[in-house]
Amino acid sequence: MILPWNRSELAIVFTMEQCSAITGALARAGIGCHVKARDRSSGGGARRRSSTLFQDHSWLYTIYVLRRDLPAARAATGLSPIR
């Protein structure tokens, strides 16, 4: 079970297709994940206007994995850390 105190953020994406691609790669590698979906359009007008020009980013998907599985999840998905 992935609980808040033993999870790490793997990625934040704006489309369901990107989310499905990442979670599919994790499933093929046998790595469990948790996805948190947030509706950005219900948070008020200021947040809605902050999206990129001509793109609709009304949903935000945050993908979490167990902290111990983070290096393996990065290798399985091809993602690299930003920081």
Image (spheres, rainbow, N blue to C red):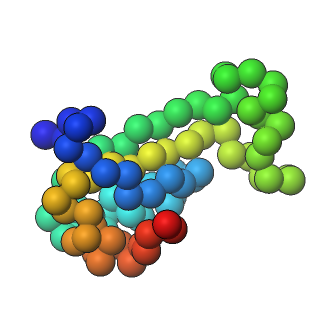
Q: Is residue 20 visible?
A: no
Q: Residue furthest front?
A: 83
Q: Nearer the viewer, residue 80 or 26?
A: 80
* Left or right: 74 as drawn, with respect to 82: left
Task: Identify the residue shown where x is 26% and y is 46%.
Answer: 7
**Which image quarter holds the N terminus?**
top left
* Left or right: 72 as drawn, with respect to 18: left
Q: How many marks?
A: 0
Q: Is residue 36 above or below residue 81?
A: above
Task: Identify the residue shown where x is 83% and y is 37%.
Answer: 49
- Percent of width and height locating residue 25: 30, 68
- Quadrant in which residue 28 is drawn: bottom left
Task: Identify the residue shown where x is 19% and y is 62%.
Answer: 69
- Percent of width and height locating residue 74: 33, 71
- Percent of width and height locating residue 50: 79, 42
Q: Nearer the viewer, residue 6 or 56?
A: 6
- Percent of width and height locating residue 80: 43, 74
Task: Identify the residue shown where x is 27% and y is 35%.
Answer: 4
* Left or right: 29 as drawn, with respect to 38: left
Q: Is residue 83 visible?
A: yes
